[in-house]
Amino acid sequence: MKLGLLTAAFPSLTLEQVAQWAHDNGFEALEIACWPSAAGEGRRYAGVAHIDVDRLEPKRVRDLMRRYNLEISSLAYYPNNLDPDSATRQAANDHLRGVIEAAERLEVETVGTFVGRDQNRSLADNLEDFKKVWPPIIKFAAQHKVKVAIENCPMIFSSDEWPGGRNLAYSPAIWRQMFELIPDENFGLNFDPSHLVWQFIDYTRAVREFGPRIFHVHAKDMEIDRDGLYENGVMSAGLGWQVPRLPGLGEVRWDRFISTLYAIGYDWVVSIEHEDRKFEGELELVQRGFLVARNTLRPLLV
């Protein structure tokens, strides 16, 4: 397995600056943020475009990666692909197709994204939308020889995302339904154990069950704030008790998790997703955060 990072935590740096720092600090791959450059999302950790897919220069990007001895593990674009506003939904779907086309041109195998969800409608209603929106996208990706990896984040961390969250694909029961509806081999998961921790779902069991569908892995940890949980309970909106941390600073047992990945034959990139507020605000702090995560994971990856 190889160690990588998601570039979205470096919005002020160019792709080359990120690549040089990653190379100099022992990383082997980049998961490159590809939000729309003209009107990116204002949501935290979104709206970053280290590759502008509308002005893509494939040779320049490939040469840059070779110069720093890095691979591209995935292109990253995580909008609400089932947004209740039809124009917003269509824009997200259209840009996702552009990212898929960019992946083919860059010879990148995987694109990471969200299924999306209308948080005010039922699971059954959202699955009906899923059946309309997603099969054509997955067929489009297959035509371009690209796999689509859905991150399992519920997107339910702020009051405006309640009650249902903005990403349907958050639990094993829903994953089974999704894969029954779209059994295509290029449709799978970008597996992040942290989102299962605060749902009290066994992430190693999930890896064992869905192993063939795991195309990419996010390394993010989750701290359970016991005082916040006591005060607010599991139904509270926002981060009242679920605290995203860097690997090694939360509840995930990385030795067990990585061991289970080895057991199912996963042999691609473990990509650090930095969302830890204790290592934010200044570039040096963000970089230190990645180094904390690197030092946790590096001994486990060969």
Image (cartoon, rainbow, N blue to C red):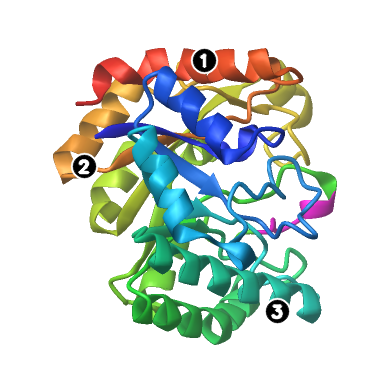
* Residue under label 2: 267
Q: What is the CA distance from the residue labelled 2 to the residue labelled 3?
A: 34 Å
Residue at the extreme right of the image, as rendered? 160
Q: Is residue 197 left or right of residue 255?
A: right
Instruction: Give, as a three-letter code, the residue at label 3.
Output: Gln
Q: Is residue 31 visible?
A: yes
* Residue under label 1: 249
Q: Nearer the viewer, residue 24 or 152?
A: 24
* Residue under label 3: 90
Instruction: Give, as a three-letter code, the residue at label 1.
Output: Leu
Residue 247 in the image: state x and y as whole percent.
47, 22
Q: In the figure, 276 relative to 209: above or below?
A: above
Q: In the figure, 261 relative to 183: above or below?
A: above
- Quadrant where the N terminus lies? top left
Q: Is residue 270 visible?
A: no
Predominant SS along the magenta part? loop
Q: Which residue is at 77% across, 38% downward?
A: 238
Instruction: Give, as a three-letter code, the residue at label 2.
Output: Asp
Query: Within the image, what quadrant is residue 147 found in?
Result: bottom left
Q: Nearer the viewer, residue 108 or 174?
A: 108
Q: Which residue is at 35% across, 23% downward?
A: 254
Span shown in magenta: 160-166
Sequence-wise, the earlier of marks 1 and 3 is: 3
Q: Which residue is at 27% across, 43% downward?
A: 268
